[in-house]
């Protein structure tokens, strides 16, 4: 209830700021409060997969539905202060995603207050609409934290960018987390760019329920990657990341690990990573700024491939997923994607076999 009330309070404040009408502000701080930037996107997905992706083998193995629809409102309500509100529809549910105010008046850092993404993981911080594959890798979905209410500082110096924040995760009303990320643009010359990064998150879960429960990178299939149900006390997360861009080629790799301690002081270890390669036929690089990847700028074709792996050590379970794909960008607003996925599982040192899937997406941004 406490987290819900904080979210409602933040949303109410942002709505008031976005709709207020102040003619002018003093001391050179005149802002057009009538200006609210509206943007968004929607995705329609088609998945066709083997029955091995389902718990109940009698269920349909083909589904077409709205994967996600989102609308965002941005406004500058006073000098150096901005606000954002995003509303998302997915899996037959509507929820608030971003709901924050941001102060950008300092030279050394920006301050963000409200519901926002925690600064952890290159892939998780890249918007789903800018991904090269239809779905994020298994490890990013399983381990990397998503959005939480909190306070975050981020800034940059030389070739480094950093984030450090205090958050209230949604696990329980009393859970808390300190999450930080540091990236280094180790090399940049023309279209040749090398990025390295690391992130940490120390999470006090205060006897909340914790469980790994993920699909094998096919959204409309069942969640077959299932860990033990834990009454968790703490969770310690670590991540390292690499990005290399060169004349249309993009190489991404991450390794993440988690140590979850339950209320009986038993520790459960989870770890995994991915390596992803993509190439834009134009030879132009995908946009990059302040340690984060952006969109494709112009009409283009893109070819992609990824290998991802995830281990649940105490459950003695491993998943390996191989994917290849092709993307077509007729314009900045329109995108078509096609992925072929081969997923393999090993449990108690026994291979459970491989299962295959095809995922398609049509995406429109405005």
Image (spheres, grey):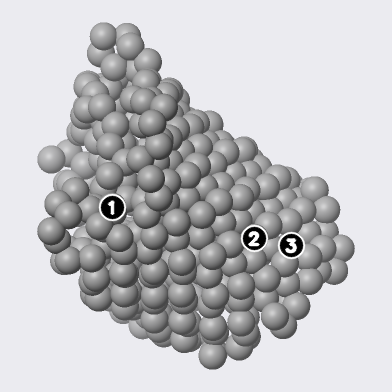
Residue neighbourhood size for the residue with mark 3, other residues' Cα within 10 Å, grouped as few (<14), some (14–19), many (≥20)? many
Q: Label 2 vs label 1: CA separation?
A: 27 Å
Q: Can residue 139 be seen in this view?
A: no
User: If you read the primary sequence from the N terminus, does the residue marked by circle 2 or circle 3 appear first?
Assistant: 3
Task: Report the quarter where the C terminus lies.
Answer: bottom left
Image quadrant where residue 298 sits: bottom right
Task: Return the residue at label 3.
Answer: 245
Number of marks in the rendered image: 3
Mark 1 / mark 3, whichever is N-terminal: 1
Q: Is residue 10 above or below residue 280?
A: above
Graded by Cα atoms within 10 Å as few (under 14), some (14 to 19) or many (20 or more), the crowding at tag 1 reads many
Residue that numbered label 2 is attached to: 277
User: Disc 1 on helix, strand or loop?
Assistant: helix
Residue 198 screen position, x and y as percent: 62, 38
Residue nearest the observer in this picture, 263 or 21 = 263
Between marks 1 and 3, how big is the CA–CA gap?
A: 36 Å
Out of 359 and 292, give the one closest to the viewer. Answer: 359
Which label is found at residue 52? 1
**Residues at circles 1 and 3 in contact by the CB criterion of under 8 Å:** no
């Amino acid at each position: 209830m406490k987290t819900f009330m904080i979210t409602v309070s933040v949303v109410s404040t942002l709505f008031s700021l976005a709709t207020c009408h102040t003619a002018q502000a003093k001391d050179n701080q005149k802002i057009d409060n009538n200006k609210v930037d509206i943007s968004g996107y929607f995705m329609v997905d088609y998945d066709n997969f083997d029955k091995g992706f389902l718990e109940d083998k009698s269920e349909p193995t083909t589904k077409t539905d709205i994967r996600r629809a989102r609308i965002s409102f941005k406004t500058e309500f006073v000098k150096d202060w901005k606000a954002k509100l995003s509303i998302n529809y997915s899996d037959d549910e509507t929820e608030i995603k971003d709901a924050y105010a941001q102060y950008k008046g300092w030279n050394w850092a920006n301050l963000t207050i409200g519901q926002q993404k925690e600064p952890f993981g290159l892939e998780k911080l890249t918007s789903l609409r800018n991904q090269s594959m239809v779905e994020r890798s298994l490890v990013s979905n399983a381990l990397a934290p998503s959005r939480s209410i909190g306070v975050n500082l981020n800034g940059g110096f030389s070739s480094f960018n950093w984030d450090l924040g205090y958050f209230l995760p949604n696990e329980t009303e009393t859970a808390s987390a300190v999450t930080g990320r540091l990236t280094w643009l180790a090399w940049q010359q023309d279209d040749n760019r090398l990025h390295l990064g690391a992130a940490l998150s120390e999470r006090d879960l205060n006897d909340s329920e914790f469980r790994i429960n993920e699909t094998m990178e096919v959204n409309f299939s069942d969640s077959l990657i299932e860990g033990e149900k834990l009454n968790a006390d703490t969770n310690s997360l670590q991540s390292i990341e690499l990005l290399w861009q060169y004349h249309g080629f993009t190489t991404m790799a991450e390794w993440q690990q988690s140590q979850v301690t339950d209320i009986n002081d038993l520790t459960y270890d989870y770890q995994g990573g991915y390596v992803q390669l993509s190439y834009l036929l134009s030879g132009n690089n995908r946009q990059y700024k302040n340690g984060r990847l952006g969109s494709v700028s112009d009409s283009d074709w893109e070819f992609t491939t990824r290998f991802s792996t995830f281990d649940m050590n105490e459950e003695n379970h491993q998943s390996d997923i191989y994917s290849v794909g092709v993307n077509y960008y007729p314009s900045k607003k329109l995108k078509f994607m096609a992925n072929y996925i081969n997923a393999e599982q090993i449990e108690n040192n026994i291979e459970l076999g491989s299962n295959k899937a095809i995922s398609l997406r049509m995406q429109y941004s405005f």
